[in-house]
Image: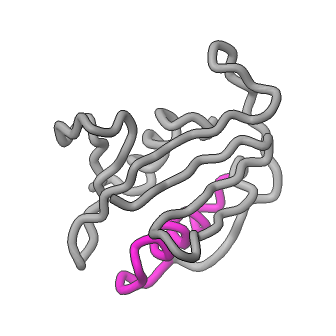
Amino acid sequence: MLMRPEQFLTYLKELLPTARTFAETGEKKYPFGMVIPRPSGEDRWQVIGQLSPAEKHDTPAPATTGTPTEGPPPPDTAPAPAWLAATLTAAAHPEIAAITVWPTTPGLTIDYHNGAKTFVRAL
């Protein structure tokens, strides 16, 4: 289940073994985030979750799967939001319904099949 920030960060660490959570780096300003090293430098991302309409904070909703997003892996030279979106898309996780790169601010929205969302904001 990826919908909550903690689970999403665990998934990112599995997908990108060189990535470190903010907790691992000593970052205390944001509760959830990830530092991802790339050839161009480190990308820092804050992760914010939005529950599905039927979910409550004290009772997680079960994972809902469907047709995953699909696509090729990203080139290393892609801008950070496009690179992360393509990395997640290429992984084709069945809980992820769509990934949208924000048009004006560096970040992306991950939509899940159960209606939950994860917002990933570049810092």
Q: What is the quadrant of the C terminus in the image?
A: bottom left
Secondary structure that dominates the magenta span: helix
In the picture, measured across the screen, residue 32 lies left or right of residue 20, that is: right
Q: Which residues are magenta?
A: 74-93
Q: Image quadrant of residue 108?
A: bottom right
Q: What is the quadrant of the N terminus in the image?
A: top right
Q: Image quadrant of residue 115?
A: top right
Q: Image quadrant of residue 65?
A: top right
> Residue shown at 75%/25% (left/top)?
55
Name the spot of residue 121 as percent of width and height, x first. 45, 57
Query: How many numbered marks does the figure carry?
Result: 0
Q: How is the image coloured?
A: one colour
In the picture, measured across the screen, residue 19 lies left or right of residue 82, that is: left
Name the spot of residue 15 as percent of width and height, x first. 44, 54
In the picture, measured across the screen, residue 19 lies left or right of residue 106, that is: left
> Residue shown at 49%/64% (left/top)?
107
Q: Is residue 75 magenta?
A: yes
Name the spot of residue 17 as percent of width and height, x first. 33, 53
In front here: 16 or 84? 84
Compared to residue 54, the image places residue 64 above or below, namely below
In front here: 94 or 30? 30
Q: Residue furthest front?
A: 104
> Residue shown at 30%/64% (left/top)?
43
Name the spot of residue 88 as percent of width and height, x first. 55, 62
Q: Residue furthest top?
A: 58
Q: Is residue 20 magenta?
A: no
